[in-house]
């Protein structure tokens, strides 16, 4: 299994800048860069595995048992919890802001209306408040729940750095930067890069769709009227097109659920990447990953790396990408608060 390289193997020359920058502008840019670097270093230092080992030793075990209880009744809750954490981190960072209830709150944004699993997080929080009142943040519960959801779906597990605090702001207006199933790769890349995530992270995290579902209304346009002449999306494998059309008939029920991975929808494996490689991706944003040279190489590296149903490379890379995601703009130390109830501020 490969190991992350922590040290550079050699020095590279920095190309000379061929345009002029004023000393004042240069100072501003350097200042901004330093602030970002310091913020990241502080977040990394203050988040740590076993953060609650003394203050609430059973914290992660309590979350795990709660997730497992809901999962045993309905396995589709797993991708929902994973998506909940992802949507939380993409807006104001991983601070539990997506959990707040309110007419103008984040969870009421159009892109968040189909989110589910809020009651699972609230249940875990209620149990933790009975054991360790005012100690475990809702943001940390989300991060741990996402890990447990993957593991329960036969996916990898990892140590989740904890110590996040909950945010005091939740605004639906700030959710406009969430990735959309209509986004071309260029837009996906831009949205992920804005959060410090590169092409490799993008493809790896989208691999969570191996256990996800969508509704016909989000991709049926690809089946019937993708072009001006009413034809289907030419990137769809023709043998698969008929299967998609049977699942989502023209003018049919747009709310019908369809698995994003037709190969093994309940298992966290690399079947999703094989689908994208073979033109069987459901969402347009997923399929477009094969049309971009940079993202295609990552898809191929996962699609062709299989041992049983779980690719070792993907099983190794996904936890790393999730840890990177869960560190986005976290609040620590005296920032934010530790909510008593996840759906409302203290």
Image (cartoon, helix red, strand yellow):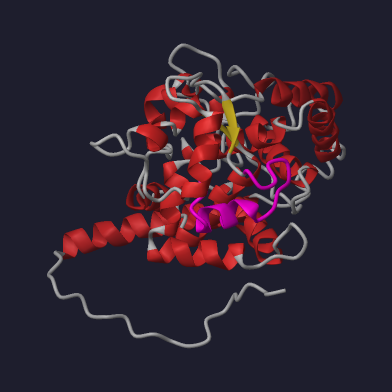
Quarter residue 81 falls in: top right
Q: Position of residue 254 (x, y in %)?
A: 48, 21
Position of residue 189 in the picture relative to residue 298 (left or right): left
Position of residue 287 in the picture relative to residue 165 (left or right): left
Is 296 rendered above or below residue 89? Answer: below
Position of residue 258 in the picture relative to residue 134 (left or right): left
Residue 270: in magenta span? yes
- Residue in the picture at 73% in, 40% down: 149
Q: Position of residue 331 (x, y in %)?
A: 56, 40
- For the C terminus, which image quadrant? top right
Is 46 rendered above or below residue 72? Answer: below
Can residue 313 be seen here? The reply is yes
Q: Residue extending furthest top?
A: 103
- For the N terminus, which image quadrant? bottom right
Nearer to me, 5 or 295:
295
Count the labels in the image.
0
Residue 171: in magenta span? no
Q: What type of secondary structure mainly makes up the magenta span?
A: loop
Q: Position of residue 233 (x, y in %)?
A: 37, 44
- Residue in the picture at 39% in, 30% down: 174
Residue range corresponding to the magenta coloring = 262-281
- Residue in the picture at 41% in, 37% down: 180
Q: Position of residue 61 (x, y in %)?
A: 86, 38
Position of residue 73 in the picture relative to residue 260 (left or right): right
Nearer to me, 279 or 145:
279
- Residue in the picture at 52% in, 45% down: 240
Nearer to me, 232 or 259:
232
């Amino acid at each position: 299994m490969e190991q992350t390289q922590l040290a550079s193997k050699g020095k590279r020359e920095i190309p000379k800048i061929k345009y002029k920058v004023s000393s004042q502008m240069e100072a501003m840019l350097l200042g901004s860069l330093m602030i970002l670097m310091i913020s990241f270093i502080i977040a990394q230092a203050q988040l740590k595995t076993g953060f609650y080992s003394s203050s609430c030793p059973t914290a992660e075990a309590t979350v795990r048992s709660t997730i497992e209880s809901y999962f045993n009744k309905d396995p589709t809750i797993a991708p929902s919890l994973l998506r909940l954490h992802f949507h939380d981190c993409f807006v104001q960072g991983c601070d539990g802001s997506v959990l707040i209830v309110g007419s103008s709150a984040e969870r009421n944004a159009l892109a968040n209306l189909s989110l589910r699993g809020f009651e699972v997080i609230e249940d875990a929080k209620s149990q933790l408040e009975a054991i360790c009142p005012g100690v475990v943040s809702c943001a940390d519960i989300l991060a741990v729940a996402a890990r447990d959801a993957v593991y329960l779906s036969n996916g990898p597990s990892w140590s989740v750095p904890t110590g996040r605090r909950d945010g005091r702001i939740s605004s639906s207006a700030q959710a406009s930067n969430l990735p959309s199933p209509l986004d071309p790769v260029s837009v996906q890349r831009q949205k992920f890069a804005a959060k410090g995530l590169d092409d490799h992270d993008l493809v790896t995290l989208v691999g969570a769709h191996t256990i996800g579902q969508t509704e016909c209304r989000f991709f049926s346009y690809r089946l019937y009227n993708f072009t001006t002449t009413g034809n289907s999306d030419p990137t769809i494998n023709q043998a698969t097109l008929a299967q998609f059309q049977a699942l989502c008939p023209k003018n049919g029920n747009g709310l019908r659920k369809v698995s994003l991975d037709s190969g093994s929808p309940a298992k966290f494996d690399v079947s999703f990447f094989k689908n994208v490689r073979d033109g069987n991706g459901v969402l347009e944003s997923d399929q477009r990953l094969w049309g971009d040279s940079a993202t295609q190489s990552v898809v191929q590296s996962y699609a062709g790396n299989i041992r049983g149903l779980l690719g070792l490379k993907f099983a190794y890379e996904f936890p790393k990408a999730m840890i990177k995601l869960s560190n986005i703009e976290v609040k620590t130390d005296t920032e934010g608060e530790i909510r008593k109830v996840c759906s409302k501020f203290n």
